[in-house]
Structure formats: C-alpha cells, structure tokens
Amino acid sequence: MNYLLVDGLNMFMRAKHVGGRGDSIDMKIGMAMHIMFNSIKKCVKDFNADHVVFCLEGRSWRKDFYEPYKRNRQVARDKMTVTESEEDKVFWEIFDEFKDFVTEKTNCTVMRHPQLEADDLIAGWVQAHPNDNHVIISTDGDFAQLIAPNCKQYNGIQNVTITHEGYFDDKGAEVIDKKTKEPKLAPKPDFMLFEKCMRGDTSDNVFSAYPGVRTKGTKNKVGLNEAFADKDTKGYNWNNMMLQRWTDHEGVEHRVLDDYQRNVILCDLTAQPGNIRSIINDTIEEHMTPKEVSQVGMRLMKFCAKWDMQRIADQAATFAEPLQARYPK
C-alpha cells in the first residue's frame, strides 16, 4: 500500500497564507480551500497513493512535560491586531468545517487525539505499517528523522520531494544546492535528529542543550560531528561534550546531558514517554478500519456549494476520487 500522510494543520496554514493582503476574507477562504483540495488531488496522483490519512493536532502532551513548549505561538497571537484576530477566528472555524467534512463525508482516515500532535500520529502510522510505503505531506523539518527507503516527504511550498536518495523537484530532477552548486545531498536522519536535540528548535521554543555548539570541533573543543561519531560507544568525545556545564541568562546552571535528554523526549518521534506511546498505538489501531461512506462526490458537491467552490464542484468526480479510497480490509 502507498499511504499519503497529510499533516493537516501544516497544509491548512500553508494555504491560509497564500491570499494577498488586500483580498477579502471570503476570497482568502475560497483560495485556501482550493489549495487544500488541489494539493490532495495532485499528491495522490503524483505519488500513486492508495489511501489518504489526515493527521490533526491536539493540545500536545509536550506542553505538560516542558512548560516553554510552543509558548512563542501564544506570544505571536497576542500581537495580532483586532482585524487579524477576527480573520484568524474565521479561518479556524473554516478549518473545523474542513475537518468535519473529511472525517464524516469521505473514506479518508482522519486521526486526532487531545494529547497528541500530528507528528506523533504520522510517525506512529509509519511505525505501524513497516511493509508499506508512505509520503508525508508537510513542510515541517521534524519529519526528516523518518526519511527511509519506504518513507519520503513532500514539501508543497518548494515543490520538493525528500527521499533517502536525495532531494528532487516535481520533474524528478535533482535539486541543486545553492551553496555548493552540486546536487543536494540526501538527509542523514540520525545526525539531523541529534543536531536538533543539541541545538533545540526555535520554532517550537525548545531551548538548546548547548548554546553556541559548533558542528565541527576545534583543537580544544569537541563539536557535534565528533560527539555524534562517538555516540554509540560513549567514549571521550561524547562524554567531553555531554558533561559540559553552562549558565543561562538567569544564572541557572545546566548540564548538557540533562538538557539533551529532555530534548530527545521532545523531538525524537520514537522516544515519547511510555504512557504517550500507548496512546499513540491505541489511536492508530482504532483507525485501522475501513470507513463505508458512499456518494463522496455528491457530498463534496454540497460542501463546495456551501463555500462557493465552483471550479472544484465542476470537477467533483476527479476531486472526490482520492477521498473515496478506503483503508484496506
């Protein structure tokens, strides 16, 4: 089976920000909906997908585990103008309608749990289907750790597919690195995850385990490359880095190893706490059952009429086809 795993909120936010500053809210909504449906249709065709799986966001267990997690998102929302806030509220209402449609009116698998993020669900799905092929539709760099012979990622903003063999454009040509002028090298999932756990993630407000750490070490200081090479044996370079201590701007002392281990739990999509792993596995298992929704095309036409999506309604059969495909029995 070829599964298309859609990071639902990521796709929606990408579609939401396409509209121009002067466009009306109705125009922006229509454009966002068109982008969502067109993206799904395109990706199903391009990757020969057999079934579409939408993974949606919950509040996230990480906020309870680590208080600063994604706190920067609320700061950004607090800075919105009244107009921006009202527009944002309307968009969230529209997204809820879209979620209800794909959940109730299509045969797509739609997963959400109050304690889980889409990342947890996507990784859990891949882990639960090791003999199948998966394409993750998202611009989120967190998924680099999942890249494998049976798992690739499609970035719809850059129109780039990331595989274990390299980066490719929509025509299958290798993407050229702007710095080296050579084909962009395939990702190294293990090192990329290690680097993320060490450097932190500013977009999610995950603090660095070792601020200012260099990728390549010097004569007197171990870098990420040397520590990573020593990771399995836990030799001199590993311990030299992990036992370092540093003091933050509030005068609190940190040991690198402690903050690194915290970040592993936050960032490694195989290292969630045991109770969270159980929730992920149970949620995946609950959704490994085919839905029996009929007349998806007709239901899509009704949805289009509500949001004045005439171009999609005119080709309802084509757009509905990928939404009709059931999870295999």
Image (spheres, helix red, strand yellow):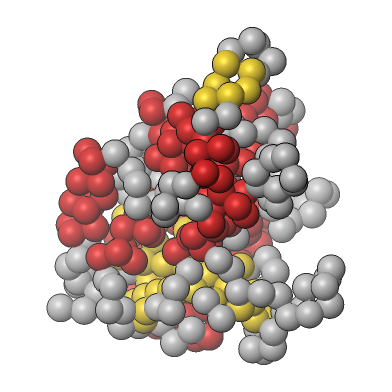
Judged left or right of residue 73, residue 249 is right
Judged left or right of residue 303, residue 291 is left
Image point (83%, 49%), residue name:
22
Q: Please state, as top left, top right, bottom left or bottom right, where the N terminus lies in the image.
A: bottom left
Judged left or right of residue 5, residue 186 is right
Image point (71%, 75%), residue name:
184
Vertical relation: 224 (above or below) 210:
below
Q: Residue furthest top?
A: 251
| Residue 31 drawn at (x, y percent) | 65, 62
Figure quadrant of residue 100: bottom left
Vertical relation: 170 (above or below) 271:
below
| Residue 208 drawn at (x, y percent) | 60, 34
Image point (15%, 78%), residue name:
329
Residue 140 appears anywhere in the view: no
Figure quadrant of residue 140: bottom right
| Residue 106 drawn at (x, y percent) | 32, 69
Image point (68%, 66%), residue name:
157
